[in-house]
Amino acid sequence: MTKTLDRTEIGLLIALPLLILVAFILPKWIVNYVHVSMGTGLVALGVMIQMRAGLVSFGQGLYFCVGGYAAGMMAKFLGVTDFFVLLASGIVAALILSALLGFLLRRYREIFFAMLTLAVSMILFGLLSSTEELGSTDGFNLPTPSYLGWTPEGDTAQFMLYTLTCAIAIGCAIALNRFLKSPIGYVNEAIRENELRVEYLGTSAHQAVHITYVLAAIVSAVGGVLWALPLGHVDPEMTNWTTSGQFVFVSILSGTGNIAAPMIGTFILEIVRVYAVEISPNTWQMILGSVMLLTIIFLPKGLWSLLTRKTRTKKSAGANASVAGE
Amino acid sequence: MLTATAIAVDGLGFAAWLFLSSVGLTLIYGVMRILNIAHGGFYALGAYSSAWAIGIYTATGSTVALSFLLIPLAALIAGVIAGLVVERGVLRFMYGRDEVLMVLVTYAIFLILEDVTKLIWGTESYVAWQPAFYFGTVEIFDIPYTVYKFIIIGTAIAVGLALYLVLNKTRVGKLLLVVIEDREISGALGINVTRFFTVTFVVGAILGALGGAITAPEISVSPGIGAEIIVLSFAVIVIGGMGSIGGAMIGALIVGFARAASVHLYPPAELFSIYLVMAAVLAVKPYGLFALAESRKI
């Protein structure tokens, strides 16, 4: 870690104490939404880093679910309640599954990648829905986690879980920010532009995609564990394709410009959903769809590009010229 | 023997239903290179409008025989309206964009259509069983099957045959094959590609709606059926090779029999046997059985 922190990372590090602080100030229900959207935000982050390589995963819910279920099964069948063990089991499960599936999926791009990821997540959906030991479509409950032998109760337990969730989510975001700025991160952008040229330049696109896929899986599984623990429940809906679709929605809406964008986007979406569902329950998806269409048409780089537009207009004169010359 | 017959008949039934539900999807992809997630929405619209129309019609106490006309009629009306609105209203501004982007666009349209159906027909479920039992049942090796199941199988064969004849034996169909082969050259040769796109999309939408409409008497039509069918029809057209109508037929047969076999031999596997078959096919033939060859662009 010889590199100095960039602006995003400094911002994230400042955000961490602020997030913990708001737990004391804001009403509890908002804090709960912040808490839960940390988990789903991490999955959106997983979708977003794949989008950098031009890959749209319509089945990221798979690892969201694998994380949640792995932690849940550890608790259910082995009686483990330690937070760190549960988290680790989610990560290991996602690591193994994604490393294996990666060999199949890394051969595909574009719509085939989108549909295969979707199909794989639906296999798990089918499996879990018909497994009675795991509660079929109802899922099962998770215990309150303990921390290295210490089991807090009531408000302390909630605060402890919240603080750890914030710290881990921010940690993941910083790690992924580093990843996007690493050689493989840049290879991913090159793959999106033109994969054949990447191969001609002597880099394995398959390998880069595989690594990205595994990383995205791990982050999503972490998200799954962090999401399941505060709710205390997992069910197969986590891996249904409509859930995965929402992660894609968040990544489209917030854009691939910045690592913090999907996290903030998820939180805003959760809050808007609370009010929208209350005001008119049958038009929520319509709002989602319309917003998504408008974003694709008018803000192809997502809402985040609104923030960076000013700084880019100065630089873009040169960039546009090179695009035109393609 | 009993199980084998049951698997054969049920497999054919599933296959017919799957073919009707997914042929529009593969047609639209073949011609327009759009993987249309909104197809699930068309299916739901067709199912709802047919169940609703049949419900109103039978409530009047008239003869059930005529309600069979309502099924294609409902599909036609729902498909034409929805197809035209979606194509003229949104998609025509997006032609030539990235294929993945079109998936996202049609996903957004799918979400909107889901709520449109909820706003029109509410969230309760509709049952319109009358046509399904009108002709009674036939027994094959002591297992009763509704005659309606065989009507669906017949319809699927008729639709497949009609598409084949239109594409290969008529002038319009041959022009369409040219558009599929190369969009730019066919435009340069004076073919009105945009009009072909509009017509294909509307026909695809009607076929999707027909899939829903013809299934409606057999099921309880409720929210969420669109989301279910879309993943199934993806599996079907991916196995057959996207854009190939013959492929969709083969894919529907494979998926149909796989599902029927698991229903009768090992029921818990029903939901994922389909995707397992799909993964197996793709591991051998990465782009499906009858995929069109793609040129690599440098």
Image (spheres, helix red, strand yellow):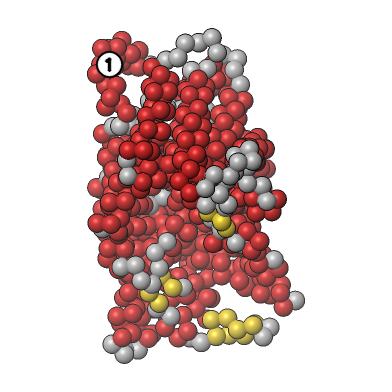
Q: Which of the pair A230/A228 is nearer the observer?
A: A230
Foreground pick, B122 / A318: B122
Residue A178, placed above or below residue A251: above
- Please, is residue A218 above or below residue B122 in the view? above
Task: Kindly indicate the quadrant of the structure image that contains residue B162.
Answer: bottom left
Q: From this viewpoint, is residue B163 visible?
A: no
* Residue that mark 1 sits on: A311
Q: Which residue is drawn at 49% across and 31% down?
A: A167
Residue sitting at 36 percent across and 52 percent down? B110
In the image, taking residue A254 as reference, residue A231 lies left or right, namely: right
- The answer to whether residue A224 is above or below residue B2 is above
Q: Which chain carries label 1?
A: A
Q: Is mark 1 on a helix, strand or loop?
A: helix
In the figure, is residue A271 to the left or right of A162?
left
On the image, which quarter does residue A251 sit in?
top left
What amino acid does circle 1 point to? Thr
Q: Where is residue A250 in the image (x, y as percent from the top left)?
A: 38, 39
At which x and y percent is residue A324?
A: 32, 16
Q: Where is residue A8 in the image (x, y as percent from the top left)?
A: 40, 21
Q: In what quadrant of the picture does the C terminus of chain A appear?
A: top left
Residue B1: give x, y in percent of width and height.
75, 76
